[in-house]
Image: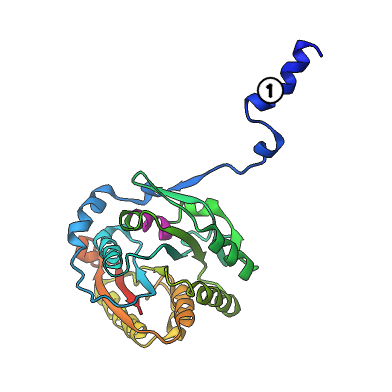
Amino acid sequence: MNLLAQFLLILPLVFGLTGAQSSAPLRVSINADVFEVSELFDASWAAGQGSGVACKTFRAGVVNHHALASDLLAGFFSTLKRCQPEISHFIILSPDHFSQAHASVATHALAYRANGLEIKADVSSTERLLHALPFAVDQPSMFEREHGVGALIPFLAHEFPHASVTAVAVKSSISVVERGSLATWLKAEFKNPDTFVIVSSDMSHYLDERQALANDQATERAFSQNDQAFFASTNDDFSDNGPSIAATLRALGKTKWTLMQESISSAYGGSPGFTTSYLVGFWE
C-alpha cells in the first residue's frame, strides 16, 4: 500500500469522521437570553419576592410571557422555589404566537441556554408526547422565536437550574379531539409528583384599561370555577392561550385555583388605551 492510500485510510480516524460518528446528531440549543430584557430581569427579583402566597401542593400554574411584567415572572418562580423546591421537570404550554407550527401542537428536544446556564430538554417526556399525539410535530426551529417559552426560561433557570423542560406550542385552532389528547397526555405526566405544568399566557390584549380589567374579572371567575368551556372558546380579549388552560383543567380534574397576583401593562408605564393584562396563579 503506498503512502497516499495509507493516509486516506487513516484520515477518518484522525478527524473523527467514521460513519457512526458522522451520523450522530449535532448538539444544538436555543438561546433564551434573546428573550430577556436584562435591566428588567435584574430588578425583578427584589420586586417579585413578596407574593405572600401560602404554600400548598401546587401541580400547575399560569404565568405571563410579557417581559414588561418581569416582577410577576420572578414572583411566580420564587414562590415555586419556596414552596416546592423538589420540582425537577417543567412542562411549558405556550401559544403558537406566529402560527409557525406545521400542526396544532409542536414540541422539540433541544436545550435552552440562559445566563450561562443550560436547561436540558426532557427527551423522554417529548417522546411520550409525540407518541400520544400522532398529529404533533417535532419542530425546534419555531421555538427560536417563540417567547411564550423563551421569556420564561431565564426566570426558571434562576430558581431551578437543574430542572428539565418540555416545551409545547399549542395553536388556538386546536380541535376538541386534539385538545382531549393533549389533556390525556398531561394527566399521564402528572403521575410524576416532581413534574409541574406551566401555562404561559397573557390575558386581555389590545383593549383599553377599563375593558381589559372588566374582562379579567370574568376570566378570574372562570379560573375560580374551573370553567373549561370558558377557556376552550375564549379569544385574545381574555387569554391568548385558552386551549392550554382548558386542557390543563381537564387533566387536573378536581382542583383549586389560587391567584398570586394580577396587573396590567398600563401599571408599568404602557398606554392605558392599548393594554395587555396579567393573571398569575396556581392550581392545587
Apparent side of residue 196 relative to residue 208 in the rendered image (left or right): right
Residue 152: within the magenta?
Answer: yes
Characterize the local packing of mark 1: few (<14), some (14-19) or many (20 or more) Cα atoms within 10 angstroms. Answer: few
Residue matched to label 1: 11
Residue 19: within the magenta?
Answer: no
In the image shown, does 237 or 177 lie closer to the viewer? 177
Asked if 108 appears above or below 242 in the picture, the reply is above
In the image shown, does 200 or 174 lie closer to the viewer? 200
In the image shown, does 125 or 96 lie closer to the viewer? 125
Q: Position of residue 7 (x, y in %)?
A: 72, 17
Say what amino acid the circle numbered 1 marks: Leu
Q: Position of residue 81 (x, y in %)?
A: 29, 64
Q: Position of residue 127 (x, y in %)?
A: 59, 62
Colouring mode (rainbow / by chain / secondary structure / one colour): rainbow
Can you say which quadrant of the picture contains the C terminus? bottom left
Q: Position of residue 107 (x, y in %)?
A: 54, 60
Q: Residue at x 32, y 57 (%)?
A: 155
In the image shown, does 55 or 206 lie closer to the viewer? 55
Query: In this rendering, does residue 145 appear at all?
Result: yes
Can you say which quadrant of the picture contains the N terminus? top right
Asked if 67 appears above or below 175 in the picture, the reply is above
Residues rendered magenta in the picture: 147-154
Question: SS class of the residue under badge 1?
Answer: helix
Query: In this rendering, does residue 133 appear at all?
Result: no
Apparent side of residue 222 relative to residue 177 in the rendered image (left or right): left
Q: Residue at x 28, y 70 (%)?
A: 83
